[in-house]
Amino acid sequence: MIGQPLNRVDGPLKVSGRATYAYEYWEAGQPLYGVIVGATIGKGRITRIDTEKAERSQGVHLVMTHHNAPVQGVRDESVQFEYWRAQPALTGPDIHYYGEPVALVVAATFEQARAAADLLEVEYAVGRGRFDFAADDDETYIPKVVNAGFPTDTAVGDFDAGFNAADVRVDQRYTTPYEFSMPMEPHACLVEPRGEDLTVYVASQIVDAARASVAATLRIAPERVHIVTPFVGGGFGSKLGIHAETILAALAARVLGQPVKVALTRQQIFQLVGMRPTTSQRVRLGAGRDGRLAAIAHDVTMHTNPDLEFAEQTAATTRSLYAAPHRLTSHRLTPLDLPRGSDVRAPGEAPGLLAVESAVDELAHALGMDPVELRIRNEPTIDPERDVPYSDRHLVDCLRDGARRFGWERRPTTPASLREGRWLVGYGVAAAIRGHFQGPTAVRVRLEADGTAVVQTDMTDIGTGTYTILTQVTADGLGLPADRVRVELGRSGLPSSWGSGGSWGAANSTAAAHRACAALREKLLVAALGDTRSPLHGRDPADARFADGSVHIGGASQALSEIVARSHPDGMAAEGEIRFMGDDPNYAAYSIHTYGAHFAEVGVDADTAEIRLRRMLGVFSVGRVLNAKTARSQLIGGMIWGAGAALEEEAVVDSRSGAFVNRDLAQYLVPVHADIPDVDAVILDGYDDKANLLGAKGVGELGICGAGGAVANAVFNATGLRVRDFPITIEKVL
Ligand code: MOS
């Protein structure tokens, strides 16, 4: 059952509209509607807010501003992870970025709330904001920490000596723009107060984080907060934590003693959930004529909000990618008065590999060497910065297999030399690597007396297929058909998990479920073998086999339903847990990653410079595959996003106001079907026994890693033009 391309078990609910999302709950009765009013300046102070007209407007129940908002908890940096901290809103008159909430207007209907919001009068003293990453870099500083706990800087060997002595050198700067997670389901929340308790229906990737964050902000005990998030319409990092919609809905619901719901508009998503920081990345590669790298340096500067520091781990991925004796990586921050940078799918690897894999292509060109061969030549035997072996590294297999499948030998070795009609045609390749994480996760599996297994954890399914893979692993673990397994997710009170994020959710939750099934099998055997009425009584448990809903020992068998009905008529349960990777010796002893190789073919119109992606192939190594269909979907989705990052995606700041000017999906371009031709993802058979007891690793973020690099390198191969300022739009290629 594990690995089979089982259709999503939640698919029928979703396509028939029966999967309920946060904004759609009606259990609480008729809710009130909140509309967030955002600042129309990027830096300064509110000098006056006149709420009177809005308050008198039809249907309005509350206009909440910093004057009357309840006192809230403060962000506590001693709480290890950002998403578990308080996220206070409307705390004072100061404006830190354009669109920051200045009021919540609550009314009986959404239309009344929106109409009243327009009546609010806000006056500002406008301050001098820093909004221009390229110009406002005087105060660039070293971050306190880099996201996910990576060291800020690393140095191995003597970079300058190694680089200066190299036969061939690449020293280039690449820039990447602000990018946003744009889930189909906007960030939304419905809060129902019940006495001291709050039920919070919210789109969230991590139940435990949402609960802790709401509780810390409202200064109530976490046990009083009940998170409900069984279905999430995409997250991509933007729902790892909660945002203003949740906090403001919760504050208003408590003040009013009534359910309140708030959703962000699509435009507000471009202001209030954080974005991938813009970067400037200097990459230096020094190699011998044989292509062997002597020196690698990756120095990254990115924007941060000064009060809400965030350093994406953009150079961290370079540390484990290629061998070279002399190495340097660094992260620096330029404070700007813009929203907080935040986790966006493959934080660090996505923009980092775009730069590094472009630079490797530049080196291949300078050497006159095939870029696949150059990468293979620099394959490390151990992790070059951590000095530990890799658990299960198959980058070279991905490169070789991909090159064969893609027909890489047809690549024109001279750029701009292959023409088909008006199209200049080029091929590109790039490598993918992504770390594997493990966090404390518990899963309970309960067998009912009717033979149904119920899997329970507060893990979420953000559209990735969690319901389905937990069904498969549990069916496999208990020898049940898949339709006898029911999965319950996304609710506080269920066994606690690390949620969906960092590509850890699938492997973590299934490994814990696998362990729960093993414990449950033990319990079933004890019950059956100890029962004198059982045909299995007195037999050897070592010979037990679980299949077809029964336990079989030798020629005898008994149905699981019967064992449970006799011994535990109310159901028999067992829990499985996995621990934090910091407490797991494998994570110290091995460098655990997933790998891939991307291949892209583009056509560039010789006259208009229109760039069309023609085909794309990714070959990946992710350990054991849990579900071939959902894994492939994840990878293809990531690859498409990577293609968009190379060619289209870019949020532009108005350097006068600090507003993102293209803050909707008409002007913030992401690939549509017409942009995406034949894309395929192939997953190599695998099993990483160091990752966990299932041998599985995550796939959600691997697909985007390096994908854009392959596209960018194909554009160079087609045209001979190297664009280092992403995205590669027409005017840069003309
Ligand atoms: Mo991911 S950016 O941790 O959802």
Image: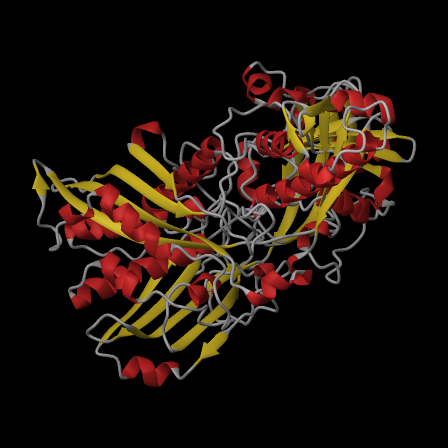
Quadrant of the drawing holding the N terminus? top right
Q: Using the rendered view, name the quadrant where residue 70 is placed.
A: top right
Q: Position of residue 421 (x, y in %)?
A: 7, 35
Snapshot quadrant of residue 76: bottom right
Residue 66 appears in view: no
Using the image, determine if residue 91 lies above or below residue 291.
Answer: above
Vertical arrangement, residue 106 with respect to residue 16, above or below: below
Residue at image point 56% right, 43% down: 271
- Note whether residue 438 is visible: yes
What percent of the width, then of the height, locates residue 422?
Answer: 9, 37
728 left or right of 148 in image = left
Which residue is more in the foreground, 655 or 278? Answer: 278
The answer to whether residue 601 is left or right of residue 434 is left
Closest to the observer: 528 or 82?
528
Compared across the picture, whether 81 is left or right of 637 comes to right
Q: Residue furthest right?
A: 195
In the displayed structure, would residue 507 be above or below residue 51? below
Number of marks: 0
Query: Horizontal placement of 165 versus 147: left or right?
Result: left
Which residue is painted at 67% across and 30% down in the image? 554
Q: Residue 649, how many percent across, how many down?
A: 39, 43
Please report the residue visible at 60 percent of the width from the left and 24 percent of the height from the top: 482
Q: Nearer the viewer, residue 412 or 436?
A: 436
Q: In this view, does 475 lie above or below 45?
A: above
Q: Residue 178 location, x and y as percent?
A: 45, 50
